Amino acid sequence: MALIVQKYGGTSMGSVERIEHVARKVASFHQQGHQVVVVVSAMSGETDRLLKLAKAIDPKGSAREFDQIAATGEQVTIALLAIALQKMGVPSRSFTGWQVPIRTDDAHMKARIQKIEPEALLAACRAGIVPVVAGFQGITEDGSVSTLGRGGSDTTGVALAAALKADECQIYTDVDGVYTTDPRVEPKARRLNQITFEEMLEMASLGSKVLQIRSVEFAGKYKVPLRVLSTFVDGPGTLITLEDSKMEEPLISGIAFSRDESQITVTGVPDKPGVAAAILGPVGDANIEVDMIVQNVGADGTTDFTFTVSRGDHDKALAVIKKVAGELGAKGVAGATDIVKVSVVGVGMRSHAGIASQMFKALAAAGVNIRMISTSEIKISVVIDEMYLELAVRTLHKAFGLEEARTA
């Protein structure tokens, strides 16, 4: 029998009825003879509610005290689930982060896990007890409660699976797996049986909300098999694992996209060494993250410089660049927020040429103009006008045959 870590999110824990539903799922695994460690989030919306109370008193209040408040959401759900399991005849015990303990650094509200001491959880499992652990939280060296930031419960689940040397970490959510693209944009999107850590990391970084990026990084680093499943619909879900020669190797595994994009262009900048640093340095100093970059050198000795930032940073970045442009003697500055990024992702790119050509031809045939291009070993991204987002996703999904059933 296996040692399994199961993580249930806020939607899964959103009411007493849903908590009892989760308890029945956990009890089923326990009755099959598996050792199960459960990690849970606070009820959906509860952490925001608690932090709103704190900020109503002082928006700039102590991060340590904010953590103390935020961590209580999970303290409620672990106890409720343990009670539900006990009612069903399943021995269970709740554990807060400090009771495990999960030791973190002291970066309150965004702490990093440094060490997990799993002996108490292992002892409970050996005694036939199901530990229910609070996600999202830990304890600092000085004994203060800490939280891991948004999506921290996923990270808790994966970290516990690594510390316990679990056979699998199962992430239960409101979707039944990882899809080739967002089914709301392409109804023919298909659930993937399997995907690599690298592919999932790219999909997550490009806007897929199924898993938190940090948890995927953690799982890849410690080689923890991850499975994404639905709390509400039975099924095999999607297994996220290391690349394997036995795995199916399609050219493309998925189409990802991000609406959180904006573009800034500086035109007519004197073309001389250090111009890129002169433009992007002040942007970085303003704590603005730059994504894609294109530089075009003209025949008149000037260069046009274009880059993308998140929409939330657009106005701030534009103000910084207008000041820099004046200092550099640039001819003009322009911004745009009506753009999106669409990407094809797949480890099969490593061994197959022509993916970019196929992508560009498909978009051209659909009348979609490409404004910027960026590539990596397993990803090709393009920036296009926002009005063409759904057309581009559907076009690429069809061009790479992602709606077709995959054979073993």
Image: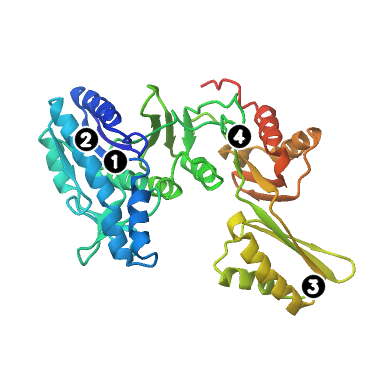
- Which residue in the protein does label 3 denote? 330
Give the vertical position of 274 relative to 394 (above or below).
below
Give the vertical position of 20 relative to 337 (above or below).
above
Percent across and percent down for residue 294 are 73, 59
Mark closest to the chain's N terminus, 1 or 2 = 1
Q: Amino acid at mark 3?
A: Ala
Using the image, tell me which numbered label, if any, was put on residue 81.
2
Q: SS at mark 4?
A: loop
Quadrant including the N terminus = top left
Q: Amino acid at mark 1?
A: Val
Residue 227 image-quadrant placement: top left
Mark 4, Cα crowd under 10 Å, few <14 / some 14-19 / many 20+, is many
How far apart marks 3 and 2 lie (CA) works out to 62 Å
Residue shown at the point (30%, 33%) measured from the top left: 15
How far apart marks 4 and 1 lie (CA) works out to 33 Å
Residue shown at the point (13%, 39%) measured from the top left: 124
Residue 398 shows up from this direction:
yes
Mark whose residue sits in front, 3 or 2: 2
How far apart marks 3 and 4 lie (CA) works out to 41 Å
Mark closest to the chain's N terminus, 4 or 2 = 2
Q: SS at mark 2?
A: helix
Give the vertical position of 164 relative to 179 (above or below).
below
Q: Amino acid at mark 4?
A: Ile
- Which residue in the protein does label 4 denote? 252
Residue shown at the point (56%, 39%) measured from the top left: 347
